Image (spheres, helix red, strand yellow):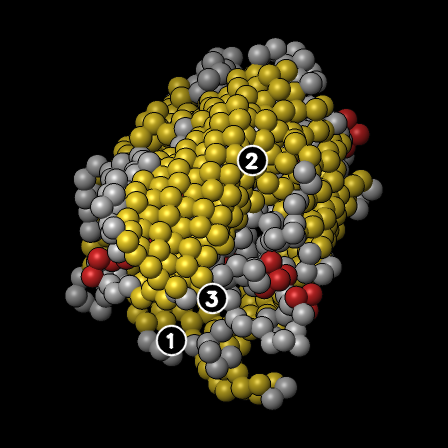
Amino acid sequence: MIKRTLVSLSFTLAPLAIVSADTTKSLEDKVTLADLPLTQRCYAHVPPVKQGSTADPSSLPVIADADHVSGQNNTFVFTDNVNVKQDIKTLTADKITYNKDSQLAEAEGNVRFTDGQLTLSAQQVHANLQSSTAQAFDTDYQFHGKGGRGSSDELIVLDKQHYILNEASYTSCPPGDTTWKVSAKEFNIDNEDNIGTARHAKLYLKDIPIFYFPYFSYPLGNERKSGLLIPSVSSSSTDGFSYEQPIYWNIAPNYDATLNIKAMSDRGVLAKGEMRYLQPQFTGMLNAEYLPDDKIYGDDRYLLSWRHNSISTKNLRFNVDYAKVSDNYYLTDIDTPIGSQTDNQLLQTSKLSWVERYWNAEVEIRDFQVLSDSSQPHIVMPKIAFEGYYPTNWYNLEADIYAEATRFDHKEHDVYTGSRYHFEPKIVLPLYTQAAFINTELTYLLTKYDQDIPSPYKETWYADLDESVTRSLPMFSIHGGLNFERNANFFDNRLTQTLVPQVKYLYVPYENQDGIGLYDTAPLQTDYYALFRDRSYSGLDRVADANQLTVGVSSSFFNQNFEERFRAAIGQVFYFTPSRVTLPSYTNVTDVSKSALLAEIDVNYDKRWFYRGGVEFDTEKGDLKRGNSTIERRWAWNKLVQLNYRYIKSTEELEQQNIKGIVNQVGSKVAWPINEQWSAIGSYYYDIDNSRKIEFLAGVKYEDCCWGVSLVYDQHMKTGYGSIGDIDNNYKIEDSIKLQIELKGLANFGSGAKTRLSQGLFDYGRPFANK
């Protein structure tokens, strides 16, 4: 008889929470609660989750113990120390009465029930076993495996999937801790649809009511639920006081949308919308933001963004990456998930491609929104490209081919436009062994341009452009190297050292290309590995002539787990004849015999000390052109100190105009846990040449069992788009104080003041991170 009562109660309580967690270790008597680590201290009162039998409950035996048992007219009474057990479920009470005819059961006095997932205490429980309904009075509940607990004056079970809690409360704080709780006049639990609703709910902090919600609903599990999300508040020197209210719409299991209304005292009301969609063959996200009549900017402002990726079939793919803002300063003024404060352009592209094993083809249109007053790039409308790779069985010989036809337009009428047709076959012979490698390539580049030259034109160098240009260039390279390896010992550590010297000869004959416009070409950045590439410019509009030999050597040390602990590389290009192909802004051909010397070093010492450094040194002029250095000491994943330095020499063009374009910056990032509950972060960057602070950020975080608070002060230089070197007119500082309160098991309140090293203008990057 009692067995059916237990089954009914288990269905009654299961909808509250089904969670899993690690079991709590038993404590020795001599260890006090204060001696435990924070995590164990917070969960010392929480029973562990226990998984019971998966068999049908009606088939499991029931064992009932009581000091006294009596029965009359099919009514049975168990009194004094009543203990009923079925599998892992237990029910204890002072008295249990059961009537076989009416199927009514009643437990009275110190009622306690547990099923391995939840423990419930009550003064009285009435249950109808036939209808699977029940009532419990003066209840206290505790979820197993997590810190969720609460109480209710009355718990009503409507059926196995639906129940009501009247005058109920919930908190994740340990017993005796009243930091926060949510109380409601009524909680309705719908386990069938996994939805909970609360009426007349109040959020209490230290027994003080903070928020009142007449009605809100929430998901019982991981399911999403439409409705109001937790609001946030913030304050900054530019926006003033801000209040943001997000509204979530769960359109379908694979579609959802979020609308944010942000009221800023100094700017106005900003509306932000985001929609996400997910299908087996495609996924994407749409964003739109609108700020009418910005009080500071003096005009309407907006943002539009669409990101889409699809694989319609095994071979067909379609991608979109589009973003547009109303003005150059939108990303620096408005907090948005699209882009970053330091972005100076936004990509607007769409691509349709077909992919096979040995070849692929694509059609692309591409544009950029430049967030400054500098020159606008050409628009790709469209680009049709084909790329093929054809291996053979003769010494790994490969035959490659690349071809494209591209139309370039421009938004300005006094800028040239044109069509480019390119054909590039290549023969590659890669030969590799464990001790050596040699890679030989022979390429032919055939390019034709049909150009429309305006009159009048924007720049004087347009006068050199030709309406029709055909360029044909062969390219030959041979790249070889040796792989040496030996065992080494350093400070009693057994290591493996590798030494890889390599050389590459590259030949490209000279052809005058001044008649070709610049559509998608710019100088490429240089590092050690870039010394061995074939081209000095991106795109196809300039192919630098070359008769050169690149020499380099790298060495690494690996431990016994084959983890790289040290790497150093140095290399340089020696020119037999100087390159004569230049961009229009670089009119002078420099008669140099060698490139700058490139050197890099990476160190990972005992996973505690990390270092990365690199230099680009002009050996002919004795000038340092570029340098960077980063050192980090790490004690734990959340305890580190990092110092870094960056230097970039001003270009000759800027120096000729007496413009100060040098980058000479020093910075630091710190993460430091003070104790188990307090931690701090800091970030500071300084411009040495201009004697200006670029960024200062300091944050502190306190964390307890059921709540946490973060406070971050941020002061940084805003992105400016004025003249290069005009630091006085470009230098503007924005500062803000952000506060975030986290109620564990409920929500976050505040402005997203997360104590992360990735905050600010400069992202955190660990030296040797990928080694």
Q: Is residue 419 visible?
A: no
Q: Which residue, given by chain and number where applicable, does mark 1 sit on?
A: 436
Q: Nearer the viewer, residue 599 or 664?
A: 664
Per the model, the C-alpha gap separating discs 1 and 2 is 73 Å
Mark 1 neighbour class, 10 Å CA radius: few under 14, some 14 to 19, many 20 or more: some
Q: Position of residue 85 (x, y in %)?
A: 35, 63
Q: Nearer the viewer, residue 79 or 166?
A: 79
Name the residue rendered at 38%, 44% in the picture.
Answer: 126
Horizontal side of residue 752 vs 513, given as left or right = right
Name which of mark 1 and mark 2 comes first in the sequence.
Answer: 2
Q: Which residue, given by chain and number where applicable, does mark 3 sit on?
A: 23
Mark 2 neighbour class, 10 Å CA radius: few under 14, some 14 to 19, many 20 or more: many
Name the residue rendered at 72%, 39% in the picture.
Answer: 714
Q: Secondary structure at mark 3?
A: loop
Name the residue rendered at 79%, 46% in the picture.
Answer: 688
Horizontal side of residue 416 vs 624, given as left or right = left
Name which of mark 3 and mark 2 comes first in the sequence.
Answer: 3
> Identity of the amino acid at label 2?
Ser
Q: Secondary structure at mark 2?
A: strand
Q: Which residue, given by chain and number where applicable, does mark 2 sit on?
A: 183
